[in-house]
Image (cartoon, rainbow, N blue to C red):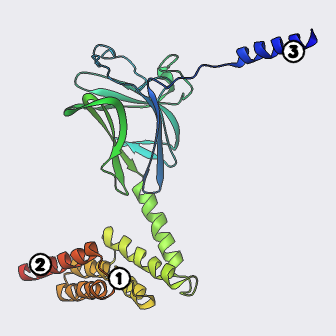
Amino acid sequence: MRQKFSILLFLVSALAFAQLKTPETSTHAEVVQHIGFTEIELVYSRPNLDGRDLFGEMIPWGSVWRTGANANTKISFSKDLFFNGNRVQAGKYGLYTIPGEKEWIIILNSDTTLWGHYGYKEENDVLRFKSTPTSTSETVESLQLYFRDINDKSGILDLRWGNLSVPIKLEIDWEAQDKMILANIDSVLALPDDRDSKMRVSHDYLHGAMYYLKHDKDLEQALKWVNKALEIQVVSYFPLYKAEILAKMERYDKAIEASNQGLDIFMVKGTNKEWIWRYKQQIKQWKELKKSN
Protein backbone atom coordinates (compact mmCIF):
# COMPACT_ATOMS: atom_id res chain seq x y z
CA MET A 1 0.00 0.00 0.00
CA ARG A 2 2.84 2.33 0.93
CA GLN A 3 4.54 1.58 -2.43
CA LYS A 4 1.34 2.43 -4.38
CA PHE A 5 1.00 5.68 -2.44
CA SER A 6 4.61 6.62 -3.25
CA ILE A 7 4.05 5.95 -6.98
CA LEU A 8 0.83 8.00 -6.93
CA LEU A 9 2.59 10.87 -5.12
CA PHE A 10 5.39 10.78 -7.73
CA LEU A 11 2.90 10.94 -10.60
CA VAL A 12 0.99 13.83 -9.03
CA SER A 13 4.25 15.73 -8.41
CA ALA A 14 5.43 15.12 -11.97
CA LEU A 15 2.15 16.38 -13.39
CA ALA A 16 2.19 19.43 -11.14
CA PHE A 17 5.60 20.52 -12.42
CA ALA A 18 5.20 19.42 -16.04
CA GLN A 19 5.26 22.23 -18.57
CA LEU A 20 4.47 21.96 -22.26
CA LYS A 21 7.12 23.61 -24.40
CA THR A 22 6.73 24.52 -28.05
CA PRO A 23 8.70 26.92 -30.28
CA GLU A 24 7.81 30.57 -29.82
CA THR A 25 5.53 32.03 -32.47
CA SER A 26 7.39 35.33 -32.17
CA THR A 27 10.99 34.32 -31.82
CA HIS A 28 13.26 35.80 -29.16
CA ALA A 29 16.14 37.94 -30.42
CA GLU A 30 19.13 39.62 -28.82
CA VAL A 31 21.35 42.02 -30.76
CA VAL A 32 24.59 43.54 -29.49
CA GLN A 33 26.34 46.37 -31.32
CA HIS A 34 29.33 48.50 -30.40
CA ILE A 35 29.66 52.11 -31.49
CA GLY A 36 33.13 53.11 -30.43
CA PHE A 37 33.47 51.98 -26.82
CA THR A 38 29.71 52.07 -26.19
CA GLU A 39 27.97 48.69 -26.12
CA ILE A 40 24.30 48.67 -27.11
CA GLU A 41 22.04 45.66 -26.58
CA LEU A 42 18.51 45.06 -27.86
CA VAL A 43 16.26 42.30 -26.52
CA TYR A 44 12.94 41.78 -28.27
CA SER A 45 10.57 39.28 -29.86
CA ARG A 46 9.97 39.16 -33.63
CA PRO A 47 6.36 38.76 -34.75
CA ASN A 48 5.65 37.73 -38.36
CA LEU A 49 3.33 39.32 -40.90
CA ASP A 50 1.46 36.09 -41.62
CA GLY A 51 -0.51 37.91 -44.30
CA ARG A 52 -1.96 40.45 -41.86
CA ASP A 53 -2.47 44.17 -42.34
CA LEU A 54 -0.14 45.86 -39.90
CA PHE A 55 -0.13 49.51 -39.07
CA GLY A 56 -3.45 51.21 -38.90
CA GLU A 57 -5.14 47.81 -38.57
CA MET A 58 -3.53 45.27 -36.23
CA ILE A 59 -1.45 48.05 -34.66
CA PRO A 60 -3.66 51.19 -34.57
CA TRP A 61 -2.29 54.57 -35.52
CA GLY A 62 -1.66 56.74 -32.48
CA SER A 63 -1.50 53.89 -29.97
CA VAL A 64 1.46 52.87 -27.82
CA TRP A 65 3.06 49.70 -29.18
CA ARG A 66 5.54 47.41 -27.45
CA THR A 67 7.66 47.49 -30.64
CA GLY A 68 7.65 43.73 -30.89
CA ALA A 69 5.78 40.90 -29.24
CA ASN A 70 5.57 39.26 -25.82
CA ALA A 71 7.50 41.24 -23.18
CA ASN A 72 8.31 44.86 -23.89
CA THR A 73 11.31 45.52 -26.08
CA LYS A 74 14.39 46.55 -24.10
CA ILE A 75 17.43 48.58 -25.05
CA SER A 76 20.49 49.06 -22.87
CA PHE A 77 23.75 50.93 -23.42
CA SER A 78 26.95 51.07 -21.40
CA LYS A 79 27.65 54.80 -21.82
CA ASP A 80 25.49 57.87 -22.40
CA LEU A 81 23.96 57.83 -25.86
CA PHE A 82 22.30 60.47 -28.05
CA PHE A 83 18.99 59.51 -29.69
CA ASN A 84 18.28 61.90 -32.56
CA GLY A 85 20.40 64.47 -30.72
CA ASN A 86 18.86 63.85 -27.27
CA ARG A 87 21.25 62.67 -24.58
CA VAL A 88 20.16 59.72 -22.44
CA GLN A 89 22.08 58.37 -19.48
CA ALA A 90 23.60 54.90 -19.72
CA GLY A 91 21.17 52.24 -18.53
CA LYS A 92 18.35 49.93 -19.54
CA TYR A 93 15.04 51.15 -20.96
CA GLY A 94 11.80 49.93 -22.45
CA LEU A 95 11.60 50.85 -26.14
CA TYR A 96 8.06 51.78 -27.15
CA THR A 97 6.70 53.47 -30.24
CA ILE A 98 3.53 55.23 -31.31
CA PRO A 99 3.08 54.54 -35.04
CA GLY A 100 1.66 57.32 -37.20
CA GLU A 101 0.92 57.60 -40.89
CA LYS A 102 3.37 60.47 -41.37
CA GLU A 103 5.57 60.27 -38.28
CA TRP A 104 6.31 57.92 -35.43
CA ILE A 105 6.98 58.77 -31.81
CA ILE A 106 9.88 56.85 -30.30
CA ILE A 107 9.75 56.37 -26.53
CA LEU A 108 12.35 55.36 -23.96
CA ASN A 109 10.64 54.36 -20.73
CA SER A 110 12.25 53.52 -17.40
CA ASP A 111 10.00 50.47 -16.81
CA THR A 112 11.53 47.32 -18.34
CA THR A 113 9.36 44.80 -16.47
CA LEU A 114 6.12 44.94 -18.44
CA TRP A 115 4.44 42.35 -20.62
CA GLY A 116 3.85 44.21 -23.85
CA HIS A 117 2.50 47.70 -23.17
CA TYR A 118 0.12 46.58 -20.43
CA GLY A 119 0.75 48.79 -17.42
CA TYR A 120 2.67 51.33 -19.49
CA LYS A 121 2.72 54.77 -17.84
CA GLU A 122 3.68 57.90 -19.72
CA GLU A 123 4.99 59.39 -16.47
CA ASN A 124 7.86 56.88 -16.68
CA ASP A 125 8.97 58.15 -20.08
CA VAL A 126 12.58 59.28 -20.12
CA LEU A 127 12.50 60.54 -23.69
CA ARG A 128 10.08 61.02 -26.58
CA PHE A 129 11.10 62.11 -30.06
CA LYS A 130 9.82 61.79 -33.63
CA SER A 131 11.03 59.80 -36.61
CA THR A 132 9.80 59.90 -40.19
CA PRO A 133 9.01 56.46 -41.65
CA THR A 134 9.79 55.53 -45.25
CA SER A 135 8.34 52.90 -47.56
CA THR A 136 10.60 50.15 -48.85
CA SER A 137 10.38 47.93 -51.91
CA GLU A 138 11.46 44.88 -49.94
CA THR A 139 8.90 43.19 -47.68
CA VAL A 140 10.28 42.08 -44.32
CA GLU A 141 8.27 39.15 -42.93
CA SER A 142 9.69 39.11 -39.38
CA LEU A 143 10.03 42.36 -37.43
CA GLN A 144 13.65 43.40 -37.53
CA LEU A 145 15.52 45.85 -35.32
CA TYR A 146 19.01 46.17 -36.70
CA PHE A 147 21.99 48.48 -36.78
CA ARG A 148 23.39 49.95 -39.99
CA ASP A 149 25.81 52.63 -41.17
CA ILE A 150 28.02 52.07 -38.13
CA ASN A 151 31.25 53.94 -37.51
CA ASP A 152 33.14 54.83 -34.32
CA LYS A 153 30.92 57.87 -33.70
CA SER A 154 27.37 57.00 -34.74
CA GLY A 155 24.96 54.59 -36.40
CA ILE A 156 21.34 54.01 -37.31
CA LEU A 157 18.95 51.73 -35.43
CA ASP A 158 16.39 50.72 -38.03
CA LEU A 159 12.96 49.27 -37.37
CA ARG A 160 11.87 47.24 -40.40
CA TRP A 161 8.59 45.38 -40.81
CA GLY A 162 6.41 44.83 -43.81
CA ASN A 163 7.27 47.62 -46.24
CA LEU A 164 8.11 50.17 -43.59
CA SER A 165 11.40 51.49 -42.26
CA VAL A 166 11.68 53.71 -39.17
CA PRO A 167 15.22 55.04 -38.55
CA ILE A 168 16.64 56.17 -35.21
CA LYS A 169 19.91 58.12 -35.25
CA LEU A 170 22.35 57.08 -32.50
CA GLU A 171 25.48 58.99 -31.51
CA ILE A 172 27.99 58.46 -28.75
CA ASP A 173 29.64 61.21 -26.67
CA TRP A 174 32.43 61.59 -29.21
CA GLU A 175 34.36 64.30 -27.37
CA ALA A 176 34.58 62.19 -24.21
CA GLN A 177 35.68 59.10 -26.14
CA ASP A 178 38.25 61.02 -28.19
CA LYS A 179 39.73 62.54 -25.05
CA MET A 180 39.99 59.09 -23.46
CA ILE A 181 41.64 57.56 -26.54
CA LEU A 182 44.18 60.36 -26.87
CA ALA A 183 45.13 60.01 -23.20
CA ASN A 184 45.51 56.25 -23.67
CA ILE A 185 47.70 56.71 -26.76
CA ASP A 186 49.94 59.15 -24.89
CA SER A 187 50.27 56.90 -21.83
CA VAL A 188 50.98 53.69 -23.78
CA LEU A 189 53.47 55.21 -26.22
CA ALA A 190 55.34 56.85 -23.33
CA LEU A 191 56.23 53.38 -22.01
CA PRO A 192 59.62 51.76 -22.83
CA ASP A 193 59.75 50.02 -26.20
CA ASP A 194 60.76 46.77 -24.51
CA ARG A 195 57.48 46.66 -22.56
CA ASP A 196 56.21 43.77 -24.68
CA SER A 197 56.96 41.77 -27.81
CA LYS A 198 58.13 43.64 -30.91
CA MET A 199 54.91 42.74 -32.71
CA ARG A 200 52.68 44.24 -30.03
CA VAL A 201 54.78 47.36 -29.46
CA SER A 202 55.03 48.07 -33.19
CA HIS A 203 51.25 47.76 -33.46
CA ASP A 204 50.80 50.23 -30.61
CA TYR A 205 52.68 52.82 -32.66
CA LEU A 206 50.78 51.88 -35.81
CA HIS A 207 47.37 52.17 -34.11
CA GLY A 208 48.29 55.57 -32.71
CA ALA A 209 49.28 56.71 -36.20
CA MET A 210 46.11 55.28 -37.76
CA TYR A 211 43.91 57.06 -35.21
CA TYR A 212 45.60 60.38 -35.93
CA LEU A 213 45.25 59.78 -39.67
CA LYS A 214 41.59 58.85 -39.51
CA HIS A 215 40.57 61.78 -37.32
CA ASP A 216 42.63 64.54 -38.95
CA LYS A 217 45.05 65.09 -36.10
CA ASP A 218 48.78 65.89 -36.18
CA LEU A 219 50.00 64.10 -39.34
CA GLU A 220 53.67 64.79 -38.60
CA GLN A 221 53.23 62.95 -35.32
CA ALA A 222 51.38 60.14 -37.10
CA LEU A 223 54.27 59.80 -39.57
CA LYS A 224 56.80 59.60 -36.71
CA TRP A 225 54.78 56.83 -35.09
CA VAL A 226 54.38 54.74 -38.23
CA ASN A 227 58.12 55.11 -38.92
CA LYS A 228 58.79 53.99 -35.35
CA ALA A 229 56.54 50.98 -35.92
CA LEU A 230 58.54 50.04 -39.03
CA GLU A 231 61.80 50.61 -37.16
CA ILE A 232 60.78 48.15 -34.45
CA GLN A 233 59.46 45.55 -36.89
CA VAL A 234 58.78 45.58 -40.62
CA VAL A 235 55.24 44.24 -41.01
CA SER A 236 53.93 43.77 -44.54
CA TYR A 237 50.88 46.03 -44.23
CA PHE A 238 52.47 48.89 -42.23
CA PRO A 239 53.64 50.74 -45.39
CA LEU A 240 50.02 50.92 -46.58
CA TYR A 241 49.18 53.28 -43.72
CA LYS A 242 52.45 55.17 -44.03
CA ALA A 243 51.55 55.84 -47.66
CA GLU A 244 48.07 57.06 -46.62
CA ILE A 245 49.61 59.54 -44.17
CA LEU A 246 52.13 60.81 -46.72
CA ALA A 247 49.45 61.20 -49.40
CA LYS A 248 47.26 63.16 -47.01
CA MET A 249 50.24 65.43 -46.47
CA GLU A 250 50.47 65.71 -50.31
CA ARG A 251 53.92 64.11 -50.34
CA TYR A 252 53.00 61.88 -53.27
CA ASP A 253 56.53 60.79 -54.26
CA LYS A 254 57.13 59.53 -50.72
CA ALA A 255 53.67 57.93 -50.68
CA ILE A 256 54.46 56.03 -53.89
CA GLU A 257 57.78 54.96 -52.37
CA ALA A 258 56.01 53.61 -49.26
CA SER A 259 53.39 51.78 -51.34
CA ASN A 260 56.14 50.19 -53.44
CA GLN A 261 57.90 49.10 -50.26
CA GLY A 262 54.79 47.24 -49.12
CA LEU A 263 54.16 45.81 -52.58
CA ASP A 264 57.72 44.45 -52.75
CA ILE A 265 57.22 42.61 -49.46
CA PHE A 266 54.13 40.83 -50.75
CA MET A 267 55.61 40.10 -54.17
CA VAL A 268 58.67 38.47 -52.56
CA LYS A 269 57.24 36.85 -49.42
CA GLY A 270 53.70 35.94 -50.32
CA THR A 271 50.94 35.71 -52.85
CA ASN A 272 48.19 37.58 -51.00
CA LYS A 273 46.33 38.92 -54.01
CA GLU A 274 44.15 41.29 -51.95
CA TRP A 275 47.11 43.19 -50.50
CA ILE A 276 48.96 43.21 -53.80
CA TRP A 277 45.85 44.74 -55.37
CA ARG A 278 45.54 47.32 -52.56
CA TYR A 279 49.12 48.47 -52.95
CA LYS A 280 48.79 48.70 -56.74
CA GLN A 281 45.61 50.74 -56.33
CA GLN A 282 47.43 53.06 -53.94
CA ILE A 283 50.28 53.62 -56.38
CA LYS A 284 47.83 54.36 -59.18
CA GLN A 285 45.93 56.80 -56.96
CA TRP A 286 49.06 58.64 -55.76
CA LYS A 287 50.32 59.02 -59.33
CA GLU A 288 47.00 60.50 -60.44
CA LEU A 289 46.96 62.90 -57.48
CA LYS A 290 50.53 63.93 -58.20
CA LYS A 291 49.59 64.82 -61.78
CA SER A 292 46.59 66.86 -60.71
CA ASN A 293 48.53 68.95 -58.19
Amino acid carrying label 1: it is Ser
Does 31 appear above or below 46? below
In primary-sequence order, the first of circles 1 and 3 is: 3
Q: Where residue 155 sits: x, y (%)? A: 34, 48
User: Which numbered tag is attached to residue 289?
Assistant: 2
Q: Is residue 231 above or below residue 105?
A: below
Q: Residue at x 27, y 85 (%)?
A: 267
Number of the front mark, 1 or 3: 3
Q: Of the numbered discs in the image, which one, if any, rests on residue 6?
A: 3
Looking at the image, is 125 positioned above or below residue 88?
above
Q: Callout 2 environment at 10 Å: few (<14), some (14 to 19), or many (20+)?
A: few
Q: Amino acid at mark 3?
A: Ser
Amino acid type shown at disc 2: Leu
Relative horizontal placement of residue 37, taking residue 250 as reference (left or right): right
Q: Determine which of the numbered discs, if any, sits on residue 236 in the image.
A: 1
Task: Characterize the local packing of mark 1: few (<14), some (14-19) or many (20 or more) Cα atoms within 10 angstroms.
Answer: some
Looking at the rendered structure, the secondary structure element under dot 2 is: helix
